[in-house]
Amino acid sequence: MDHAISPDEVPQVDDRRSSAEPSTLQAADAQGDRGWPALAVDEQGSAHVMWLDHRGLPSAANQVATHDHKSSTPYDGVAMAQRSGLYYAQAGSSPATERELTPGVRYCCKTALAVAAGGAVYAAWRNVYPNDIRDIAMTVSRDAGRTFTPPVRVSEDRWQLNGCPDDGPALAADASGTVHIVWPTVIGDTTPEGALFYSTTRDGRRFTPRVRVPTLGSPKPAHPQIAVDERGRVMVAWDEVINGTRVAAALQMSHGGAERVTFGAPLVLAGDQSAMYPVLAVTADGWLAVWTAGKPGASRIGVRRLTSAAR
C-alpha cells in the first residue's frame, strides 16, 4: 500500500518536550561550504556526524580564477580534491569537536555512516584517487569515534572521471556486526554503463567480492539506499530513468552459503508516477520506503510498506 502524505498528515512533534537548541559542529571561523552530512546514533545516545568540508576551496578557487587557461599546465582535479576533507564530530551524550579524518574526497557525493554491534562506527564516501579515479573508501572507529583507521578502498571499480558523479554509498549494519554497503559506479571501457554494487565487511578492511544489484535496465541507476531488519534481511532502494520518467524501485536480497547472494525481483515503488531519492526505514513487519514524487512546485512525499518475501 502506498499513498502521498500531505503536510497536515505529517505527525507533529511537541517542541516543548523533544526539541533542543541546535549546536554548530564546525569551527565558527571555517571558510567555504559544507555538505552531504551523515548521522548515526549509538546505543549510548551519542550522535556521530560526518560531512564533506570545503574550507580549503576558497583559496583554490582564486587560483583557478587567475589561472592562465592558455598555459600548458593542465587543471589537476586530484590536487584540487586535496582541498576538500572528510570531517567528523560528535553531539549528544559524548560531544566531541570537529576534526578532519582525511582529505582528497569527491566533494559532491553523499557520505554514509553506520554503527555496528559493539559500537564500531563505519564511514564510507567517494574518494579521489590518482588519475582521477572516483572509487568508494571506508574507515572505521572501534573506540566510539576517538580514532579512525586509515581509509581503505572498498572496491577497485576504477571509475575515471574528471568531474562530479553526484552520487555516493549507503551503509547498514546488522545484529551480527556485519556491515552492508551499496554504491553506484560506472563500468566498461568501450561502452560505459552505470551500475549498483553490493558488498559486506566485518572489519572495515576486508570486503566480500562486489555483486551487481539487478536494476530496471537503464544506463544509470542512482541514489542507492540500504536497510537491514533485525533478522538480517536486506532491502535496497534506488532510482533510475525509464522511458523518460525517473522511477524509484526496491528489492530484497538474501544470503546463502559461501558468500552467495540472491536477489528478489525489483519492485517499482510508485507505479508509473515519477519518483526519486527513495529512503528506507525498518519497521516491525518489514520496511518503509519513502520518496519524493511529482514535479518541482507540486512535489509530495510518497510512502509504501514493503514486506519480506520470506517470513
Image (cartoon, helix red, strand yellow):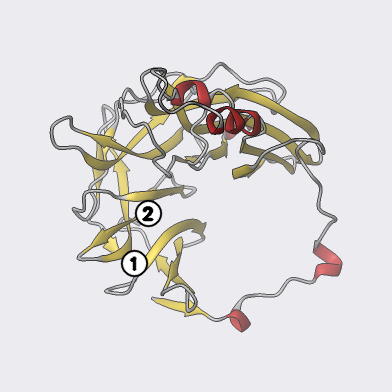
As rendered, which of 137 and 230 lies closer to the eye? Answer: 137
The kind of residue on which mark 2 rests is Ala
The earlier-in-sequence mark between 2 and 1 is 2
Q: Position of residue 54 (x, y in %)?
A: 62, 35
Name, please, the residue furthest toward the left: 190
Local packing at callout 2 (Cα closer than 10 Å; few below 14, some 14-19, many 20+) is many
Does residue 64 appear to the left or right of 274 in the view shown?
right
Q: Identify the residue at image location x=52%, y=20%.
A: 151
- Is 68 or 273 nearer to us in this picture? 68
Q: Which mark is residue 237?
A: 2
List the residue tagged with mark 1: 269
The residue under the point 72% across, 23% down is 146
Q: Amino acid at mark 1?
A: Leu
Q: Secondary structure at mark 2?
A: strand
Asked if disc 2 and disc 1 are in contact, CB closer than 8 Å, the reply is yes
Q: Position of residue 177 (x, y in %)?
A: 51, 32
In the image, residue 271 sits, relative to residue 263, either above or below, namely below
